[in-house]
Image (cartoon, rainbow, N blue to C red):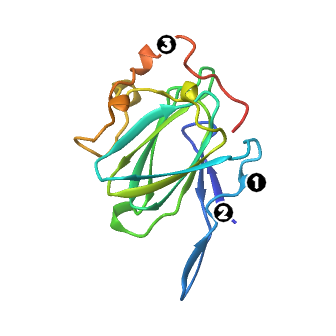
């Protein structure tokens, strides 16, 4: 069974340390189980992103969608920031290294991100990231905050990241339009 670790910095975020079953043939890992997140909804869509070293994706957030991330290859530095009005951890930022950290073996961490927590990652090396979501893609629920907003105090681990035009144009936290900041969710 996996070890489920609630974040000490951001309410509702859960880090998953899975059990690795290894023998002479290789290994088997259960990367996700619905029962690990009893207050969450059913994950209904799976996505995969292949990113080159130096890329930054995010920071994105959703008012209604939760994500579950896993990095099967490469090294990704994940940055999370709580944007939820009324959250006991509103304004907290957390960095988590996932995958093949420091050139070593894969740490196989999973990561549950509740709605309202901004999330992004830097490809420290070429990497593959898979993520499950509990809602179908909805442009109206695809929001963002500027990846290098000084208020977030995020350490991306990169000097000159490769960004999409969309991510480079996201607003500072202080400039998020009225009504577009999420509220605390009972789902975690």
- The label nearer to you, 3 versus 2, is 3
Mark earlier in primary sequence (1, 3): 1
Q: Quadrant of the N terminus?
A: bottom right
- The label nearer to you, 1 versus 3, is 3
Locate residue 156, reporting x and y percent: 34, 42
Rendered residue at 29%/53% (across/down): 53
Locate residue 50, reporting x and y percent: 40, 54
- In this picture, residue 57 sits left or right of residue 12: left
Q: Quadrant of the C terminus?
A: top right
Q: Which mark is residue 177?
A: 3
Check disc 2 and report its element: helix, strand or loop.
Answer: loop
Rendered residue at 23%/42% (across/down): 159
Local packing at callout 1 (Cα closer than 10 Å; few below 14, some 14-19, many 20+) is: few
Mark 1 touching mark 3, by CB under 8 A?
no
Mark 2 touching mark 1, by CB under 8 A?
no
Real-space CA distance between mark 1 and mark 3, rounded to the nearest whole angstrom: 36 Å
In depth, the one of 149 and 55 nearer the eye is 55
Local packing at callout 3 (Cα closer than 10 Å; few below 14, some 14-19, many 20+) is: few
Rendered residue at 62%/26% (across/down): 87
Residue linked to disc 1: 35
- The label nearer to you, 2 versus 1, is 1
Residue ranking furthest to the bottom: 24
Quadrant of the rendered image containing residue 66: top right
Residue linked to disc 2: 2
- In this picture, residue 9 sits left or right of residue 49: right
């Amino acid at each position: 069974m996996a070890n489920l670790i609630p974040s000490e910095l951001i309410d509702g975020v859960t880090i998953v340390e899975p059990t690795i079953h290894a023998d002479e043939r290789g290994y088997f890992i259960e990367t996700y189980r619905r029962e690990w997140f009893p207050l969450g909804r059913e994950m209904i869509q799976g996505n995969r992103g292949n990113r080159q070293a130096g890329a930054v994706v995010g920071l994105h957030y959703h008012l209604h969608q939760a994500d579950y991330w896993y990095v099967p290859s490469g090294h990704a530095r994940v940055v999370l920031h709580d944007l939820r009005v009324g959250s006991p951890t509103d304004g907290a930022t957390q960095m988590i290294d996932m995958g093949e950290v420091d050139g070593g073996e894969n740490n196989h961490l999973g990561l549950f991100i509740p709605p309202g927590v901004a999330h992004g990652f830097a490809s420290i090396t070429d990497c593959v990231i898979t993520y499950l979501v509990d809602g179908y893609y909805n442009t109206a629920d695809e929001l963002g905050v500027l990846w290098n907003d000084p208020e977030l105090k995020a350490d991306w681990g990169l000097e000159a990241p490769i960004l999409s035009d969309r991510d480079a144009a996201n607003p500072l936290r202080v400039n998020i339009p009225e009504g577009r900041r999420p509220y605390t969710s009972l789902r975690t």
